[in-house]
Amino acid sequence: MLYKTNQYYEYLELFKKDDCPVCLIMDEWLDNFLEEFLYECVNDRSMRRRIMETGGFCPKHAKAMMGKGDPLGHSIIYTVLIDDYVKKPDAKKKDGCLVCDLEIDAERRSLNAFLNFFGESEEFSNAFRDTKTCICRPHLKKMKKLTKNKELIKKLSDVQNDNLLHAKACLDEIIRKHDYHYTSEQLTDEERLAWQRAVKLMSGVLK
């Protein structure tokens, strides 16, 4: 029997938006993690040890954390990082960063949850189909690697392709309505945003 977690209902709500629901889940996860980390975890010894192992944060996550502000939290972290770098500037560090590692785990859980919900719940799969939701190309590729259930992947791919064709139809309308023969026809709200949605779905970016 399928246990409908909070994430189950979160996905159903995200289907109503234009972006990849997994991207939205992960964007929220990162935002929440950085808030909690800067507020509670900067003095956590195990966390600080893992940060030291990589020499800090990758550019993506360092920038995201800067966006949170918090001069005190950053000062606590970076006094230690700078001191370590001055003492051992050529020390070998691990690739990635603390947030990268945790984000990969969170993403894998979210992808597996989606596959489970889609495979076990008609309510879930029907909502995915009916709202014309699309999973971005990078996340769909990762989903296919997470399961050996060919029937599940075919079902998901079939719905995904139908929804992508709907997205393409909106792009076709943008092109058609830019032809001088049809310039009197106004773009719908969905068509007006379709080109941005296409970029996000094919590249896996939100912003």
Image: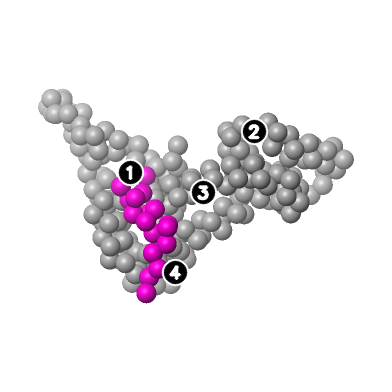
**Residue pointed to by mark 4:** 147
Q: Position of residue 154 (x, y in %)?
A: 32, 66
* Residue in view at x 48 percent, y 49 percent: 26
Q: Position of residue 115 (x, y in %)?
A: 40, 64
* Residue in view at x 61 percent, y 31 percent: 69
Q: Is residue 86 within the magenta segment?
A: no
Position of the C terminus by quadrant: top left
Q: Earlier in the sequence, mark 3 or mark 1?
A: 1
* Residue 109 visible to the viewer: yes
**Residue pointed to by mark 1:** 18
* Residue in view at x 43 percent, y 41 percent: 206
Q: Earlier in the sequence, mark 2 or mark 1?
A: 1
The alpha-carbon separation of the residues under discs 3 and 4 comes to: 23 Å
Name which residue type carries label 2. Answer: Asp
Q: Position of residue 79 (x, y in %)?
A: 78, 36
Q: Nearer the viewer, mark 2 or mark 1?
A: 2
Is mark 2 in CB contact (under 8 Å) with mark 4?
A: no
The alpha-carbon separation of the residues under discs 1 and 4 comes to: 26 Å
Q: Nearer the viewer, residue 66 or 149?
A: 66
Q: Nearer the viewer, mark 3 or mark 4?
A: 3
Tell whether 91 sits left or right of 16.
right
Name which residue type carries label 1. Answer: Asp
Is mark 3 in CB contact (under 8 Å) with mark 1?
A: no
Quarter of the image where one finds residue 173 = top left
The residue at the far bottom in this view is: 1
Tell whether 184 sits left or right of 110.
left
Disc 4 on helix, strand or loop?
A: loop
Above or below, 196 against 48 in this view is above
**Residue pointed to by mark 3:** 29
**Residue pointed to by mark 2:** 70
Q: Earlier in the sequence, mark 3 or mark 4?
A: 3
